[in-house]
Image (spheres, grey):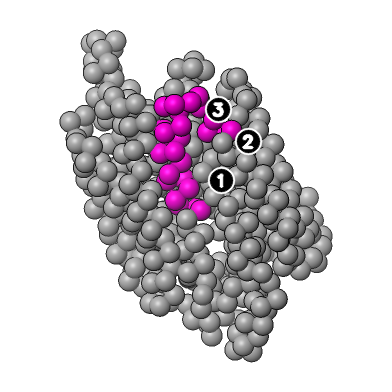
Amino acid sequence: MQAATEVQPNVVQKYKVIPIMTALLISGFIGMFNETALNVVLSDLIDQFHITAATAQWLTTGYLLTLGILVPVSGVLLQWFSTRQLFTASLLLALFGTAVASVSPGFELLMIARVIQAAGVALILPLMFHTVLVIVPPERRGTTYGLIGLVLVVAPAVGPTLSGLLIEQLSWNWIFGLTLPVLAFSLLFGIRYMQNITTITKPKIDVYSLILSTLGFGGIVFAFSSAGEGGLGAPKVVIPMIVGLLAIVIFAVRQLRMKQPMMDLRAFKQPMFTFGIVMLMIAVIVMMSAMIMLPLYLIRGLGLNTFSAGLVLLTGGIVNAITQPVMGRIFDKFGPRWVVPVGMALICVVLWFLSGITTTTSLTQIIVLHTFLMIGISMVWMPSQANGLNQLPPSLYPHGSAIMNTLQQVAGAIGTAVAVSIMSVGMSNILKQTADLADPAHTALALTAGVQHVFDFAIVIAIIGFVISLFLRRVHITEQK
């Protein structure tokens, strides 16, 4: 692999790396911002649309469901269409979906708009990772992934904050209306500077693989998303889960037997890639659980308005934005061996404190805990991701990006849906023991108890992640085959 390493700088020189990455990062930031932008206004939407919390969460999990279905196909699309074609298509879909969302009068049309938005993001995320693997040399990828971390972690983290600021002065529709010019600029900028960096081979598209992928990943995400309405044992959860798991098993067997698989699962033969995906999924589950629970706790538990709730979460978003590039540089220099376990240990400690929050917990304590949680996530997310992708040979770049982004979206849906389900069950158990259900104080106490249970669940996941992180080792360029 040494020869390939020596020619890499020449490959980089023929591409306009900074303009290409700028277009991708802006597009990805808005896409991921939209993923959690509605979290802080869910309470308002529940009242305005006259829907339940379980129904409202579909505005987030439906977005993730679309990503979970479409992202697996990205590995094939990267080999069928040029970079410029995929970039343009993704931005047009995102623009259209955002425009529809900005004028949606009710839940149904907003839900459709969210699906269209997600279809655009489903193309841009794998394209971003694949581009880095092609135009950035391995020894500099950590720093570049640190910038991507600003998109994948910071955008969802600051989404509720910016949304809270907007909705205090304007209606929730403006959350999308104000992102329209940014998307339009990104599209025009990308059309001007985007270059074709992918190799178009047009492999045969296996229809059965597409169907199995949709049933598999879509079924699992749908099952977890439905858990908030009927509980984990409800038929609408169990049946899609069984169908999804069976479809994924058949899908995996089929991919391993095909000469040109839609998603080459041989990437999992690389141990650090596998460990990296597991760590990424754990980080996503923890983050998405916190990102949907904290706004609900602050607004419905502590009685804050959306503006104040946004300010409480702002510090964590800013600190995360600062630490992501720093963690990238640390990864480039030292690898993941120490930074990831320390990050997971920090997450475990913070979650332990969060599991004890009450209606009397001070806002200062919430700000501090949320900030350190975001620091821990930045220490785990990017180094695990970059280290795993670095171990892949170039032939597996499109497939590795598709696999990692697919499972990231599945994990996000699981984290969001399971969190809402656990919270709902916890609230229900408390309210059953309450005589005066009309008393808002009892509802606040019940919600807080439900949130505590969610963080108890997150602690278990984080402890598992800490144990796994101890097995990480740095991937050197010479290890690639």
Vertical arrangement, residue 279 with respect to residue 28, above or below: below
Q: Residue 464 appears at what percent x and percent y?
A: 34, 57
Work out how far the residue at label 2 is from the one at label 1, CA to CA, in angstroms.
10 Å
Q: Earlier in the sequence, mark 3 or mark 2?
A: 2
- Could you tell me the amino acid type at mark 3? Asn
- Name the residue rendered at 41%, 55% in the picture: 321
Task: Classify mark 2: residues with Cα within 10 Å, few (<14), some (14-19) or many (20+).
Answer: many
Marked residue nearer the N-terminal end (2 or 1)? 1
Residue 389 showing in the rendered view: yes
State the quadrant of the C terminus. bottom right
Q: Neighbour class for label 1 at 10 Å: few (<14), some, many (≥20)?
A: many
Residue located 45% across and 52% down the image: 153
Query: Residues in magenta?
Result: 151-177
- For label 3, the SS is loop
Q: Amino acid at mark 1?
A: Ile
Give above or below for 184 relative to 339. Answer: above
Q: Which mark is residue 331?
A: none
Give the left or right position of residue 345, taking residue 55 as reference: left
Q: Provide the residue designation for mark 3.
A: 173
In the foreground, 268 or 351 = 351
The answer to if 56 sits in the magenta stretch is no
Q: Earlier in the sequence, mark 3 or mark 1?
A: 1
Q: Quadrant of residue 220?
A: top right
Q: CA distance from mark 3 to mark 2?
A: 10 Å
- Judge by depth and name the residue closer to the eye, 95 or 266: 95
Residue 98 tag number: 2
Per the image, the residue denoted by label 1 is 30
- Packing grade of label 3 (10 A; few <14, some 14-19, many >=20) is many
